Image (cartoon, grey):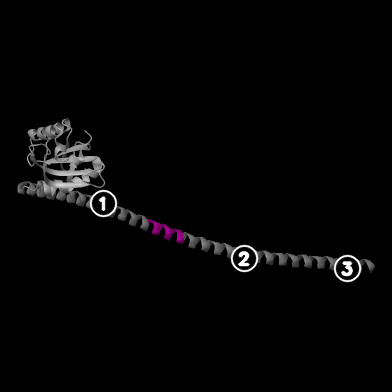
Amino acid sequence: MSSTAEKLSYLEETMAQLAYSQLKTEMSLQTLSREMREFKDEMREFKNDMLMFKDDMLMFKDEMLMFKNEMRDFKIEMSVFKDEMGEYKDWSKKQLITMNRQWGDLANKMGTLVEDVVAPNIPRIAQNYFGCDDLDYFAVRVRKKSLKRDRQKREFDVIAACQGVFILNETKSSPEIRDVDKLAAFIESNELFDYFPEYDGCKVYPVFSSLYMDDSLITYLTRKKIYALTLKDDTMDIVNWEQ
């Protein structure tokens, strides 16, 4: 009887352990199943997030492509606008040059070349080339008497002066070599200060002006150390300064 009881007790204990192991296994499987389900849900959510991110990236790519196309169109439009503005600028410059030449020709015919064309440019020329920021004296078609006994009168087209500088301008509508020679001889004779004694000792800058000058005349003026002032593009300017 004792042996049978022991066997039963052992069997019961074994069955209890087996039942406990089975229960523990079922609990572990349930936990694993729950964790796998949660992992699966997380992976599904991650997949959805990635799909959304992919859609966002595709949308961003489309927007960037659209922006790139807009920038290309804008660049083309700006290039066209720049070309049009360049053409307009060239046209305006040509129109201004034409108008200035026509105005100069009209002044030439009317005998007002000095007053209307040359004289208004002298203050700018004096400042840009001869350092006269403020002119002490400026006169157009001024008549002066010489200090010599003969008291000879002489008309000067344009005179401008500042401290230590005296600008003598002579203007001709149809310039010739002999006109240049006369001006050069007058400068070399020092007779200038017989008419303007108050500026004796100043540096003299002779300027010969005309609407149009050929290269040979400009070269001759340079040789005589006289500045050539003529129409250049849209304004009067000295054309032999660097020579």
Looking at the rendering, in which quadrant would you find the N terminus? Answer: bottom right
Q: CA distance from mark 2 to mark 3?
A: 43 Å
Question: Any magenta on residue 64?
Answer: yes
Residue type, label 2: Glu
Q: Quadrant of residue 62?
A: bottom left
List the residue tagged with mark 3: 9
**Left or right of 102: which side holds 93?**
right
Q: Spot the residue most to the top.
A: 223
Report the amino acid beneath label 1: Lys
**Relative height, residue 129 to residue 102 (above, below):** above
Mark 1 vs mark 2, CA separation in Å = 64 Å
Can residue 233 be seen in this snapshot? Answer: no
**Image location of residue 193, percent across then percent down:** 16, 37
Q: Residue sitting at 39 percent across and 59 percent down?
A: 63
In this view, 193 is above or below 85: above
Q: Earlier in the sequence, mark 2 or mark 3?
A: 3
Pick out the residue farthest to the right. 2
Residue beneath disc 2 = 38
Disc ID at residue 82:
1
Specify which label sits upstream in the sequence, 1 or 3: 3
Q: Main secondary structure of the magenta part?
A: helix
Q: Is residue 129 left or right of residue 184?
A: right
Q: Quadrant of the C terminus?
A: top left
Residue extent of the magenta highlight:
55-65
Q: Residue furthest front?
A: 149
Amino acid on which the number 3 mark rests in the picture: Ser
Label 3 crowd (10 A; few <14 / some 14-19 / many >=20): few
Q: Is residue 53 visible?
A: yes
Residue at x 18%, y 49% (from the top left corner): 93
For label 2, the crowd category at 10 Å Cα-Cα, with few meaning under 14, some 14 to 19 and many 20 or more, is few
Q: Position of residue 167 (x, y in %)?
A: 19, 41
